[in-house]
Image (spheres, grey):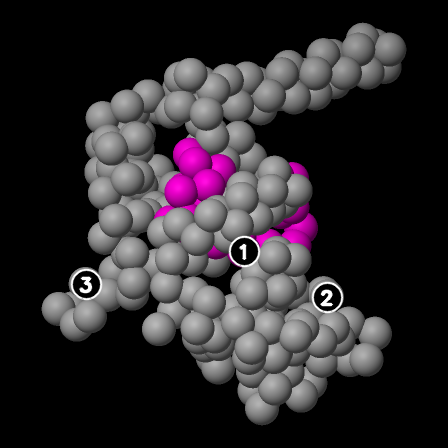
Amino acid sequence: MRFKKVIFLIILIFLQGLSLSLTSFAFHRVVFVYDGDTVLLKNGAKVRYLGINTPEIDHEGSKSEFMAHKAKDFNQTLVKGALVRLEYDKERKDRYKRVLGYVFLQNGDMVNALLVRKGLAYVISIRPNLKYRDLLLECQRKALKESVGIWSNFFRDKGEHCIGNRRSYRFHRPDCPFAMKISQKNLIKFRSIYDAFWEGYSPCKRCKPSVSR
């Protein structure tokens, strides 16, 4: 009996693993686009694109960030009403209960990467979800070189130096309280904001190092 129970448990674990893996190959219909990096699926799941951040749209009537509406429009063109496939990383949901995923079109293109390549999003690395960091960073470097999208307004601030944290992949103004708490082991100095983005670091939301004119 014990042997049969062990075999049953092994089969059950295998089937559960197979079921989880097959979810990555299922396609879901996008019914609503909130902004450049968040969508709603027909099954009710709110999906936040992993590995990137698009400019914020102000939903209260104030001024939105540079290129925010263009990012939303491009995202909408790609996915509104379309079937998409989700691929996951180490974490499935964020603290807001949104599903975290890399979103793929039926032709195999990753929407996250397309937004970065168009200069409508920048790379934001949050451990432990670093599965496609190298790919997304490659797309960002191409967009930076071509000065497209959010980078078209960028080089005015090239000379401003900043402080990065190797652990969090964030960069800060030198006088930011968070910058002052970075340990020497994790501290990295950048000659410019451009260099920080080139290395795949993203701006601190508190001190907000400038990325545009």
In the rendered structure, which segment of residues is drawn in magenta? 111-132
Q: Quadrant of residue 187?
A: bottom right
Left or right of residue 153: residue 81: left
Secondary structure found at label 1 = loop
Look at the image and tell me whether residue 23 can be seen: no
Q: Is residue 13 above or below residue 140?
A: above
Earlier residue among tags 2 and 1 = 1
Residue at numbered disc 3: 59
Tell me which corner region of the image, top left, top right, bottom left or bottom right, holds residue 154.
bottom left
Which residue is found at the position 86% from the left and 11% from the top?
Answer: 3
* Disc 3 + disc 2, Cβ < 8 Å: no
Q: Amino acid at mark 3?
A: His
* Residue lying at the far right of the rendered structure: 3
Percent coordinates x, y for residue 120 in the rendering:
38, 49
Residue at x 23%, y 43% (from the top left corner) = 73
Mark 2, other Cα within 10 Å: few <14 / some 14–19 / many ≥20: some
Ranked by sequence position, the earlier of labels 3 and 2 is 3
Q: Is residue 72 left or right of residue 124?
A: left
Amino acid, disc 1: Ile
Q: State the residue position of label 1.
A: 124
Q: Secondary structure at mark 3?
A: loop
Q: Measuring from the top left, give residue 40's x and y in whole percent.
A: 29, 39
**Vertically, is 61 above or below 102?**
below
Above or below 9: residue 196: below
Residue 101 in the image, given as x and y percentages of width and height? 49, 38
Image side of residue 52 versus residue 21, left or right: left
Using the numbered discs, state the Cα–Cα distance from disc 3 to disc 2 in whole angstroms.
Answer: 33 Å
- Label 2 with label 1: CB-CB less than 8 Å: no
> Residue 166 — which label?
2
Q: Callout 2: helix, strand or loop?
A: loop
The mark closer to the camera, 3 or 2, is 2
Which residue does the image show at 60% across and 42% down from the upper left?
138
